Image (cartoon, helix red, strand yellow):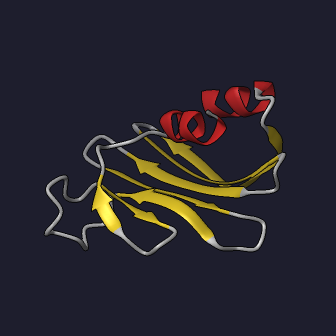
Amino acid sequence: MDILQLLDQSDWVDRYEIQDFRQWNGGLYYKLKIVFHDQSILFAREYIDESERNYSFHWQNQDDALIMRWDNAPHHDNIATFPHHKHDKKGTITENIEITIKEVLKIITG
């Protein structure tokens, strides 16, 4: 999984934990906990197969307060980018394009 190479090479990542990883013909599921040097944490979960992709990237500070979460759970159908959206620390839900873990890491690490 090339994301692990990215994490291993990152100057921003303090440590990470593979909480679940499954791969099969045409599909992949992973669940990661990534701790950054500032002690903020990204919980990353993604399911991919030939017909669907589900993801949730939940970034929180060291006190467990949400900083941002990007996901595509289909529960905000009023959003123009449905089902893709993001939640901010104020509880606001806004439009967001489909996003990958690499893009999320780029946002977090600047």
Q: Which quadrant would the N terminus be assigned to in this image?
A: top right
Residue at 48%, 51% in the rendered image: 46
Residue at 71%, 57% in the rendered image: 41
Does residue 36 appear anywhere in the picture? yes
Q: Which quadrant would the C terminus be assigned to in this image?
A: top right
**Image x and y of residue 13, in percent:** 79, 40
Looking at the image, the residue that sits furthest to the front is 90
**Image x and y of residue 97, in percent:** 29, 44
Q: Is residue 103 above or below residue 72?
A: above
**Image x and y of residue 74, in percent:** 25, 67
Towards the viewer: 45 or 83: 83
**Image x and y of residue 106, in percent:** 57, 33
Q: Is residue 42 above or below residue 93?
A: above
Towards the viewer: 50 or 102: 102
Does residue 1 appear anywhere in the picture? no
38 vs 25, left or right, is right
Residue at 19%, 52% in the rendered image: 81
**What count of labels does the image hold?**
0
Towards the viewer: 83 or 52: 83
Q: Quadrant of residue 10?
A: top right
Residue at 78%, 66% in the rendered image: 62
60 vs 12, left or right, is left
